[in-house]
Amino acid sequence: MALKKIAVFISGGGSNLQVLIDEIHQKYGEIVLVLSSNSNAHGLMRGKNNEIKSIVFDSKESDFDEKVIAILEENHVDFIVLAGYLKIISSKLVNKYPGKIINIHPSLIPSFCGANHYGLKVHEKAIEYGVKISGATVHFVDEGADTGPIIMQKTVSVDYEDTAETLQKKVLDIEHYILCVSVKKMCEDKLILKGRKVKVL
């Protein structure tokens, strides 16, 4: 059976992209595109170093959606992974790929998510609130910010001495794990979406 073709959207360093390259690429799926909203994103080099087509798009352009959809169709992309992508996906793109876009978020949704909750800010909020556990969430993308159906979550303990930086490191490890598992299940057609509930086979 042919490998599913994957596009990975990034905005920064691309550590989640690297894990997908190491664990998924050419094994369970084929990453055919890396698209970045930031021309200085280190993740672009990760793509190029692995001979994956890596492209920068300006999301402020009026025809951004049309350009992105055209390049996705040209490369026969089956589904999209948002791996540290800091832009809200438009309804046009969501409707073009319903149930085919997944995102990784560094908290236990619905806590510490939505507009302006990204990167270190998420962990600062968790520390400030005094939670005892935090974690990461992989979810399907809908038209809201971090509001789509949850695929997988995993927790870490938050210790009294933790800072936003130490918590970020803890969560990043489990981000890598659940993202890889979720993408592998997507590649194998082992995610069943019904309403807001997701069954992982």
Image (spheres, rainbow, N blue to C red):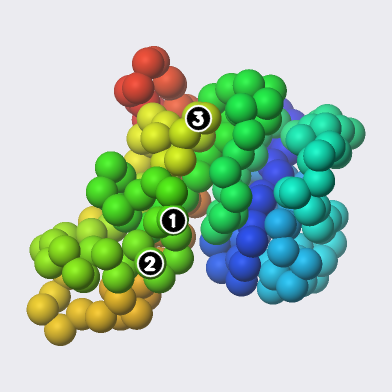
The numbered disc on residue 121 is 2
Horizontal and vertical percent position of residue 14 = 61, 66
Residue in the picture at 57% in, 44% down:
88
Badge 1 crowding class, 10 Å Cα cut-off, few under 14, some 14 to 19, many 20 or more, is few
Q: Which residue type carries mark 2?
A: Lys
Badge 3 crowding class, 10 Å Cα cut-off, few under 14, some 14 to 19, many 20 or more, is many
Q: Are marks 3 and 1 in contact (CB under 8 Å)?
A: no
Residue farthest to the top? 194
Distance (Cα) linking label 3 and label 1: 17 Å
Distance (Cα) linking label 2 and label 1: 8 Å
Distance (Cα) linking label 3 and label 2: 22 Å
Residue in the picture at 76% in, 35% down:
65
Above or below 3: residue 86: below
| Label 1 residue SS | loop
Q: Which residue type carries mark 1?
A: Asn
Q: Are marks 2 and 1 in contact (CB under 8 Å)?
A: yes
Horizontal and vertical percent position of residue 27 = 65, 48
Above or below 14: residue 36: above
Horizontal and vertical percent position of residue 137 = 36, 48
Q: Front-most of 112 and 73? A: 112
Q: Earlier in the sequence, mark 2 or mark 1?
A: 1
Horizontal and vertical percent position of residue 109 = 30, 45
* Residue 129 figure quarter: bottom left
Above or below 172: residue 149: above
| Label 2 residue SS | helix
* Residue 145 figure quarter: top left
Q: Judge whether residue 20 can be spotted in this image.
A: no
Badge 2 crowding class, 10 Å Cα cut-off, few under 14, some 14 to 19, many 20 or more, is some
The numbered disc on residue 142 is 3
Looking at the image, is mark 3 or mark 1 nearer the viewer? 1
Which residue does the numbered mark 1 point to in the structure image? 116
